[in-house]
Amino acid sequence: MAVQGTTAYRSAFKEKIEDDEKLLPYKRKLSMPTKLFVDFACPYSDRLADLEFFYALDWDKAYKRINVGISNIFNLLYTRDINTELNDIVVCCCACTWMLTVVLAIVAIVLLHISHKQAYSHYDVIVTFMLVYGTLLLDILSVFILALFTGWLADDVAQQSLIGFFTRNKRHTWLISVAECLQCKGLLDEYWCMTPCAMSKSITYLAFEYVRDGWTKYIHDAESYRRFNDNLGQWALERAECGELLGWSLEKPFDEIVLIWHVATDFCYHMSSIHNPSGRAISNYMMHLLFANPEMLMPGSRRNLFTTAYSELEEILQSEENLPLDDEKKLTITIIDKVKSKEDCFIHDAWRLAKGLMGLDDKDKMWYLIRDVWVEMLCFSAGRCRGYLHAKSLGSGVEHLSYVWLLLAHSGMETFSERLQRRRQLCLPMKEPQNIEDGDAGPSDSRELKPSNLKEEDIHAPPSISQGAESRGEKQNHAAPSAPQGEGSTVAELNEIKVVPQ
């Protein structure tokens, strides 16, 4: 019986070792994701294997893998530390070395106390004791410093608010004037911002749950997988049954969506007694990216949108003399009262959005919707940021977007390089180009070709009629809403042009 138990234990232990050896490459890949930071598009087989390993982890282990990966990449790029993994031998050697230095320092102190100090100068003895006791003190403090600062990275998330930025500039006009005279206003704005919030882990957990729900409730084929990667709030509105009411706010360029939803979130925050800290924290962080790091928010994001919205606030409040700059809630009420008469501006669109959100029956539902939309926009932005920019940002402090980006990459979502490698099926016209009378038209004769979908009388229409049709087309194009900055937006195919005489 004992022999059988021992044999079963050995076989089980051997299977565990074999499983660990199989999983070791994936652990190393997650701990040192170098390919992601150089925008290397991994094959589908590798992405699937990483997904299978990462999906089996619980939240604490998954967050630890992300944290270790960022820390190791920082050590690789910005330090001389070439050891990416600390094994037991290295830790044992470090501990033995520390114990040896402490013991030697204590021995030196004891020998100095029992030695004949009278034969030496009094000042020499004092200096010697200071050096030896100082060495012992440094060795002891080193343990506490390592225990305090080694391990997890900071849990801070940068914050920026348009209304808060406005109140700060108006309260400290003399300081802003001095900074403008010294031509360092931009540097002051970059480093003098809101206090960061310690919510990095909780916000990353929201993204973790969003991706898990996507794999279980949304993604069922390749097309739904691509739609999920292109979500920037549509799924949240669909689940809350608010697509018809608030869907217009997502039919804009992405940087404008971020600006409008940020101001609307601040309006809801100051006008409601029930708050959701995570939703507003993500809102302020996305505004921080638009203001200080727009290239990470999305390629082509316009930083001047923040300046434009700030100018709109100044124009709205220019007639007010005694602004409540010390109370953002009262200032928000003043802005809302003034912006109702303004149209065709970002602040008015934000008020329309906030009015629709606050019109929901349940305030908890409103804040859950705001939080879910911001989580989708955060993941949308992370999936479109280059790995090079994440590596660059590590030199000045870890952007929280890097956590979400690694989470998406390990969870099988598309990164920037993989999105560029996405295969698309081209829909080319099946009709052959018509030949002109003199023969086949070459490249230089392309301007003489007639469109195959136009009738003969349409081509020879009078100039006045053609100009009228063109003017009507321009009006229609001008009235059409601007398309969002993400993939997935398609242009309607032009099948036939009809010219109707007036």
Image: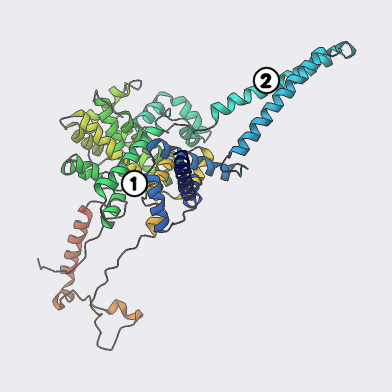
Examine the rendered structure and indicate whether residue 400 appears above or below residue 363.
below
Q: In this rendering, would 260 be left or right of 41?
A: left
Q: Residue at point 43% right, 47% down?
A: 295
- Closest to the observer, 393 or 91: 91
- Closest to the observer, 232 or 444: 232
- Callout 2, which amino acid? Leu
Q: Label 1 crowding class (10 Å Cα cut-off): few <14, some 14-19, many 20+?
A: many
Q: Position of residue 499 (x, y in %)?
A: 13, 69
Q: Position of residue 27 (x, y in %)?
A: 48, 46
Location of residue 255 by image quarter: top left
Q: Which element type, helix, strand or loop, lies under badge 1?
A: helix
- Residue on which the image places disc 2: 137
Q: In this rendering, would 442 be left or right of 9?
A: left
Note whether residue 272 is visible: yes
Note whether residue 302 is visible: no
Q: Position of residue 168 (x, y in %)?
A: 40, 26
Mark 1 vs mark 2: give the one in front.
2
Q: In this rendering, would 28 be left or right of 489?
A: right
Q: Label 2 crowding class (10 Å Cα cut-off): few <14, some 14-19, many 20+?
A: few
Q: Which mark is residue 380?
A: 1
Compute the Cα span from label 1 to label 2: 50 Å
Q: Which element type, helix, strand or loop, lies under badge 2?
A: helix
- Closest to the observer, 321 or 299: 299
Q: In this rendering, would 369 be left or right of 6?
A: left
Q: Residue reaching furthest left?
A: 502
Q: Position of residue 390 (x, y in %)?
A: 47, 45
- Callout 1, which amino acid? Phe
Q: Residue at point 74% right, 22% down?
A: 105
- Closest to the observer, 18 or 148: 18
Q: Earlier in the sequence, mark 1 or mark 2?
A: 2
Quarter holding the C terminus is bottom left
